[in-house]
Amino acid sequence: MKALYQILVMLCACVLASAQPAHQVPFASSNNAIELAIHNSSTVPVSHVKVEATNVPAWLRFTSTGQTIKQLKEKEGVTAVFCFSIEKTAPVNKPQTITFTITSSTGEQWTKQLTIAVNPPDHFELFRNYPNPFNPSTTISYQLPKDEHIVLKIYNSIGQEVTTLVNDDRLAGYHQEVWNASNVASGMYIYQLSMNNGQGKKEFYRKKMLLVK
């Protein structure tokens, strides 16, 4: 899935960031791109123009955060393309502003800002725990398309409840819960996540895991 955003920077003219709505980016997506159109509005050529993305959150992965434009002729423009992916750990529905700094060979600087917000997942999913088999701890992860009250319980192989890991509200997005099983015996266990289906009924999701000591 590809999302493309275009922003314009005019060299030799001060550029101020103005209030703008956040551009929506798909959850856990790759092959996204920002096209930064850089135009030399002066009557003299500009060389070795550096373009750098700053204020980048850890969950947003640029292929490269910097580029150098060797030559920009008078009254001409070029396009700097920044490709990026979004990790599933990204917070959803929370605007994040990225600043692009353009620096000329003489030290002059211009900035332009782009605000993005990550969309929630389009479906619920309960993932396999990791590691599995494990000793003594393992991580259980899941994603929610909307805010939910969830209950995550652990059962042994004969259906007896061992512990409740979560009985609380969780925001839309990706979550991880850690189970430390140092106080229980080796064997097969089942983790069960339950939540409302929006129609007043509970839905249950279960997966198996193996504790080996």
Image (cartoon, rainbow, N blue to C red):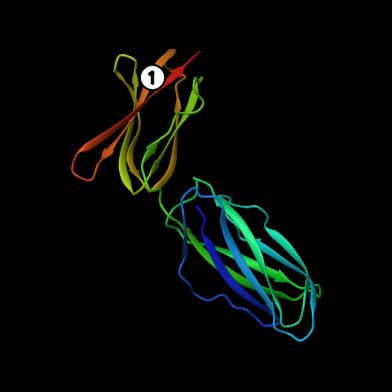
> Mark 1 belongs to which amino acid?
Tyr
Total tally of numbered discs in the picture: 1
* Left or right of 122 in this view: 90: right
Question: Please, is residue 125 above or below residue 113 in the view?
Answer: above
Residue 203, given in percent of the width and then of the height, sits at 26, 35
Residue 199, given in percent of the width and then of the height, sits at 19, 44
Residue 204, given in percent of the width and then of the height, sits at 28, 32
Residue extending furthest left? 200
Residue 144, given in percent of the width and then of the height, sits at 37, 44
Question: Please, is residue 153 above or below residue 84 in the view?
Answer: above
Q: Give the image quarter of residue 8.
A: bottom right
Classify 10 Å Cα crowding around label 1: few (below 14), some (14-19), many (20 and above).
many
* Left or right of 104 in this view: 16: left
Instruction: Between residue 81 and residue 213, name the one nearer to us.
Output: 81
Q: Which residue is mark 1?
A: 189
Question: Please, is residue 44 above or below residue 58 in the view?
Answer: below
Residue at image x 57%, y 54%? 57
Residue at image x 63%, y 60%? 82
Question: Please, is residue 101 above or below residue 203 in the view?
Answer: below
Residue at image x 79%, y 84%? 44
Instruction: Between residue 201 and residue 155, name the one nearer to us.
Output: 201
Q: Give the image quarter of residue 72.
A: bottom right
What secondary structure is marked by label 1? strand
Residue at image x 53%, y 62%? 4
* Left or right of 73 in this view: 3: left
